[in-house]
């Protein structure tokens, strides 16, 4: 299963809603240093994503999506995601959005 399929099931494109749907608890911590977040399992399949509350909301969103996807592809395997691993993805998505906007504007002009 992919995160896109979960989005279709729940009817909203939100990694936070996807996590809730999958039974993953989301927690925010103020001081995670260079970590954007991490995914872990404790006890009897208690899945958690811990996010760095000190990074931009867009990066939290992307980190959450990557960690939910990690849960889907490798359930139960703990994973650490560094902020510098998320930032290039955010930059790439921003560039793609600008290109789509520019293409859209050029079509209507």
Image (tube, rainbow, N blue to C red):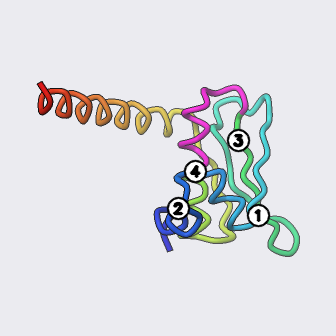
- Callout 4: helix, strand or loop? loop
Crowd band around label 3 with a 10 angstrom C-alpha radius: few (<14), some (14–19), many (20+): many
Q: Nearer the viewer, residue 82 or 44?
A: 44
Q: Nearer the viewer, residue 30 or 106?
A: 106
Residue 28 appears left or right of 12: right
- Callout 3: helix, strand or loop? strand
Q: CA distance from mark 3 to mark 2?
A: 20 Å
Q: Is residue 78 above or below residue 91?
A: below
Give the percent coordinates (x, y) of residue 3. 51, 63
Count of numbered badges drawn on the protein: 4
Residue picked out by circle 3: 51
Q: Quadrant of the C terminus?
A: top left
Q: CA distance from mark 4 to mark 3?
A: 15 Å
Q: CA distance from mark 4 to mark 2?
A: 7 Å
**Residue 7 badge:** 2
Residue picked out by circle 4: 14
Q: Is residue 66 above or below residue 84?
A: below
Q: CA distance from mark 3 to mark 1?
A: 13 Å
Disc nearer the start of the sequence (4/2): 2
The residue at 58%/39% (across/down) is 82
Q: Which residues are magenta?
A: 53-65
């Amino acid at each position: 299963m992919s995160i896109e399929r979960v989005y279709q099931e729940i009817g909203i494109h939100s990694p936070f809603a996807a996590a809730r749907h999958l039974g993953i608890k989301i927690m925010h911590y103020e001081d995670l240093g260079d970590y954007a977040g991490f995914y872990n399992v404790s006890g009897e399949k208690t899945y958690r994503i811990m996010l760095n509350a000190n990074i931009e909301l867009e990066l939290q969103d992307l980190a959450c999506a990557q960690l939910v996807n990690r849960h889907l592809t490798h359930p139960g395997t703990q994973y650490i995601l560094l902020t510098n691993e998320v930032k290039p993805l955010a930059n790439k998505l921003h560039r793609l959005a600008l290109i789509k906007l520019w293409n859209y504007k050029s079509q209507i002009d």
